[in-house]
Image (cartoon, rainbow, N blue to C red):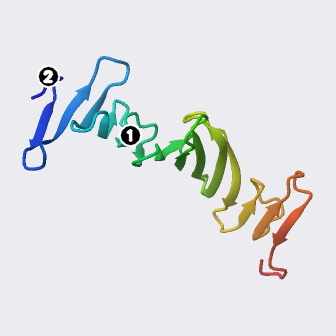
Amino acid sequence: KNTQGGLRITDTSVSNASFEIRPQTGNSTKMFRIIDVSAPNSDRFNISASGNVGISSQYPRGKLDIRFAGAPNYITFGSDADNPKVEFFRHTGGSPSHYATEIQMVSGDLVLSTAAIANLGSHSYSERLRILSDGKVLIGHTSNIFNYKLAVFGTDGGNSGISASRFSNNT
């Protein structure tokens, strides 16, 4: 037992490697934590009160939040309004802190979005590519107004771009 109400596991055959399993209380964030005691502030696994899981991520933002070694780069699995998504965050080394990309399923469509540099939690995504549930691909637009197999829209509201479609009775 440790002094914070948890359990300490020590392997004396490996340079006294120690891990603690303990609850975190005393502030607004309650969670279950597994910590590498031999490395300060080394959270290895966390489960928040809301059920979010963090691997090397102290405060998970999605249902599964994975932080990679080195710069704080993340992959987060979660959802927006019942639409499952995966977010990728790459640390910039400065402030604002992260680039972001999101892959999300929206009503059966697969949507790829990117965001300008921002701090974690403040990204505003712009849709870049959509694969419709019937396999048609849209770039630069959110709906297939011409029913093309591939439609690339320009930046002038859809008045320019390219499209590809089969020109026969068997679309």
Q: Which residue is mark 2?
A: 3
Of the pair 18 and 161, the residue shown nearer to us: 18
Give the residue displayed 63% in from the left and 55% down from the top: 111
Looking at this rendering, what residue extends furthest in the front direction?
Answer: 15
Give the residue displayed 68% in from the left and 58% down from the top: 130
Q: Amino acid at mark 1?
A: Ser
Q: Which residue is mark 1?
A: 57
Task: Provide residue 52's location: percent of width, then percent of height.
Answer: 38, 38
Quarter of the image that includes the C terminus: bottom right
Relative to 109, does residue 65 appear above or below in the rendering?
Answer: above
Task: Provide residue 15's location: percent of width, then percent of height.
Answer: 13, 46
Residue 10: image quadrant is top left
Give the residue displayed 66% in from the left and 68% down from the top: 135
Residue 93: image quadrant is top right
Residue 154: image quadrant is bottom right
Looking at this rendering, what residue extends furthest in the left direction?
Answer: 12
Task: Say the numbered circle drawn on residue 9.
Answer: none
Q: Is residue 22 left or right of residue 161?
A: left
Task: Provide residue 29's location: percent of width, then percent of height.
Answer: 36, 24
Q: What is the CA distance from the residue labelled 2 to the residue labelled 1?
A: 23 Å
Q: Amino acid at mark 2?
A: Thr
Q: Is residue 29 left or right of residue 129?
A: left
Quarter of the image that includes the N terminus: top left
